[in-house]
C-alpha cells in the first residue's frame, strides 16, 4: 500500500474509531489533520500521530457548523497544503423514543452526521478534483439498514450518508476521487459503552463472530478504501460487522 506523503482530515478523531483511523493512516506515512469538537482530545491524538513520524495538526471544529469547518480546513491547508483523504467520522449517539424526540434532537443528529459530511466534503472536494486524486470515506452504520429501537434520528442520518456516498461517488469518479461508506456493527468505543447492557447483549447475539468490533477493525477497513489500489472501488458501503447481516 503506498500512501506515503498523502494528507488526511479525520473528523471526530479524538476518540474511538476516528482516533484509530488517524493512527492507522499515520502508520502508512499519511500526515493527519485531527479534528474533534473537543480540542484537548484532538491534541492528544495529534501527539500520537506525530509520534509515528508524520505531520499532525489538531483541528478543532464542530463539523455541523459551515463556518467552523471552513476555518478548520483553511488552517489545515496551511499546515498540510492539500487534503487528499477525508474521513467523515464525527458522530454522536442518542437514545430516545420517537414520541419524545424534540426537533432539536433531530436537527442536532442530522446536523452532525449529515451536514457535517456535507461541510467537510464541500470544503475539500474541489482540491481533490483539481489534483485528480482523492478519497472520501463516510462513517455510516448498520443502523442505516437495521433501524434500531429508539434511534429514528440516528438511523435516518446514517441512511442519508449512504445516499450521499453513492451520488457524490458518481459525480467525482471521472476525476480520480472515490467516495465510499463504512457501516460498522457494534464497535467497542466510548460511544458503544454508553449503550444499555441489554442492547449490547442483543447486538452480540446477532454477531456470529462473537465479539464486539474494535476501532482497529474499522480503521483497517478505512485503510483498504483509501489505498491507491482501491481506485476501482467507489459508491460502495462496506459493513465490518462480525457477520451481523442486516
Ligand atoms: N461505536 C459503534 O458501535 C459505532 C457503530 C457504527 C457507527 N459508528 C459511527 O462511528 C463514528 C465514530 O464513533 P465512535 O464509536 O468512535 O464514537 P466516540 O464517541 O468514541 O467518538 C466520536 C468523536 O466525535 C467527536 N464529535 C462529536 N460531535 C462532534 C462534532 N459536532 N464535531 C466534531 N467532532 C465531534 C466526539 O468529541 C468524539 O471524540 C460515529 O459517526 C458513529 O456514529 C459507531
Image: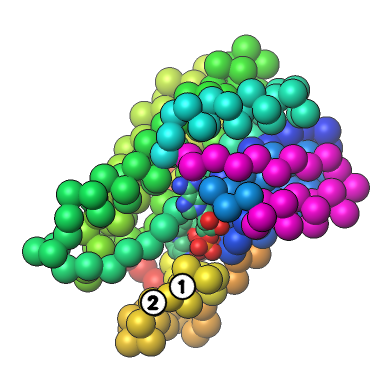
Asked if disc 2 and disc 1 are in contact, CB closer than 8 Å, the reply is yes
Q: CA distance from mark 2 to mark 1?
A: 5 Å
Query: How busy is the neighbourhood of tag 2: few (under 14 within 10 Å), some, or many (20 plus)?
Result: few
Label 2 beta carbon within 8 A of ligand 1: yes
Residue 46: say if magenta: yes
Residue at position x 18%, y 49% in the image: 103
Q: Residue furthest left?
A: 99
| Image quarter of the N terminus | top right
Instruction: Tell me the residue that label 2 is attached to.
Output: 195
Based on the displayed image, in which of its 4 quarters is residue 135 positioned? top right
Query: How busy is the neighbourhood of tag 1: few (under 14 within 10 Å), some, or many (20 plus)?
Result: some
Above-or-below relation of 75 to 3? above
Instruction: Tell me the residue that label 1 is attached to.
Output: 192
Q: Position of residue 33 (x, y in %)?
A: 69, 39
Above-or-below relation of 7 to 99? above
Based on the displayed image, in which of its 4 quarters is residue 195 positioned? bottom left
Q: Position of residue 124 (x, y in %)?
A: 57, 24
Question: In the image shown, does 34 or 65 lie closer to the viewer?
Answer: 65
Q: Is residue 101 left or right of residue 83?
A: left
Residue at position x 48%, y 77% in the image: 193
Above-or-below relation of 26 to 67? below
> Is residue 245 at all visible to an observer of this figure?
yes
Label 1 beta carbon within 8 A of ligand 1: yes
Q: Which residues are the magenta region?
A: 40-63
* Disc 2 element: loop
Visual colour scheme:
rainbow
Please tell me how many numbered marks the rendered image carries.
2
Q: Residue furthest right?
A: 53
Amino acid at each position: 500500500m503506498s500512501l506515503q506523503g498523502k494528507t488526511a482530515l479525520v473528523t471526530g478523531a479524538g476518540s474511538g474509531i476516528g482516533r484509530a483511523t488517524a493512527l492507522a493512516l499515520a502508520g502508512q506515512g499519511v500526515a493527519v489533520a485531527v479534528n474533534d469538537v473537543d480540542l484537548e482530545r484532538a491534541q492528544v491524538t495529534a501527539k500520537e500521530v506525530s509520534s509515528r513520524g508524520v505531520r499532525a495538526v489538531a483541528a478543532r471544529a464542530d463539523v455541523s457548523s459551515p463556518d467552523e469547518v471552513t476555518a478548520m480546513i483553511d488552517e489545515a491547508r496551511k499546515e498540510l497544503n492539500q487534503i487528499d483523504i477525508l474521513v467523515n467520522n464525527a458522530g454522536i449517539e442518542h437514545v430516545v423514543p420517537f414520541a419524545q424526540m424534540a426537533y432539536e434532537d433531530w436537527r442536532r443528529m442530522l446536523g452532525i452526521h449529515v451536514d457535517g459530511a456535507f461541510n467537510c466534503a464541500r470544503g475539500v472536494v474541489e482540491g481533490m478534483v483539481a489534483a485528480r486524486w482523492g478519497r472520501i470515506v463516510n462513517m455510516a452504520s448498520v443502523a442505516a439498514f437495521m433501524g434500531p429501537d429508539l434511534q429514528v434520528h440516528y438511523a435516518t442520518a446514517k441512511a442519508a450518508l449512504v445516499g450521499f456516498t453513492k451520488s457524490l461517488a458518481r459525480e467525482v469518479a471521472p476525476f480520480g476521487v472515490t467516495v465510499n461508506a463504512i457501516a460498522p456493527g457494534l464497535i467497542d468505543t466510548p460511544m458503544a459503552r454508553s449503550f444499555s447492557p441489554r442492547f449490547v447483549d442483543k447486538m452480540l447475539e446477532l454477531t456470529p463472530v462473537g465479539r464486539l468490533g474494535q476501532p482497529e477493525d474499522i480503521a483497517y477497513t478505512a485503510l483498504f478504501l483509501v489505498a491507491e489500489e482501491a481506485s476501482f472501488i467507489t459508491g460502495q458501503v462496506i459493513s465490518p460487522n462480525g457477520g451481523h447481516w442486516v
